[in-house]
Amino acid sequence: MTHIEGYASLFWTCDLNDDVAAAGAFGASLARTGARGVRMLCQHDGDHPVGVWDEIVEDARGLFVRGRILEVTPQGRMCAALVRAGAMDGLSIGFRAAKARPDGSGRLRVLTEVELWEVSVVTFPMLPGARISAVSLSAEAA
């Protein structure tokens, strides 16, 4: 089993789609579902979950996630191997914008309430700073 953690979103940081998550944007969704209601996918492939998120919290920096890639499926084994090798270290959120507004310039969309569906391990995150920051192994059975 491969344990990972990192930031899936950073507050007040523009992504490549000109979206910016406001502090607190994930709070209502997480209050409804908790970490267990958010799926761990690889490359946003909803047909093959690769693990579970044990902790998802908003802190002063952004949306922090901690979870386990389960190596009981071919997709889980491949994802874990790529993460351990450093070939894949991005995180990306799958969501619906429940509430959003334009910023003062009208160029950016400020996400003020997000319905969080999944957090994926990805090669190229939409938010370049959304990265896995720690990887560890355990001998526990998946």
Image (cartoon, grey):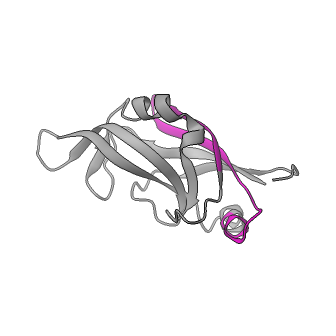
Q: Nearer the viewer, residue 60 or 70?
A: 70
Q: Position of residue 90 (x, y in %)?
A: 52, 58
Q: Is residue 33 above or below residue 40?
A: above
Q: Is residue 59 visible?
A: no
Query: Is residue 62 highlighted in magenta?
Result: yes
Q: Which quarter shows the N terminus?
A: bottom right
Q: Please tell me in which quadrant of the rendered image residue 36 appears.
A: top right
Task: Magenta stretch: give its range.
Answer: 52-79
Q: Nearer the viewer, residue 113 or 81?
A: 113
Numbered-mark total: 0
Q: Position of residue 45 (x, y in %)?
A: 52, 66
Query: Is residue 28 highlighted in magenta?
Result: no
Which residue occupies 33% across, 53% down? 15
Q: Please tell me in which quadrant of the rendered image residue 41 appears.
A: bottom right
Q: Is residue 82 visible?
A: yes
Which residue occupies 20% across, 48% down? 108
Q: Position of residue 119 (x, y in %)?
A: 51, 51
Q: Nearer the viewer, residue 37 or 55?
A: 37
Q: Is residue 42 above or below residue 59?
A: below
Q: Is residue 89 left or right of residue 100?
A: right
Which residue occupies 36% across, 34% down? 25
Q: Nearer the viewer, residue 101 or 99?
A: 99
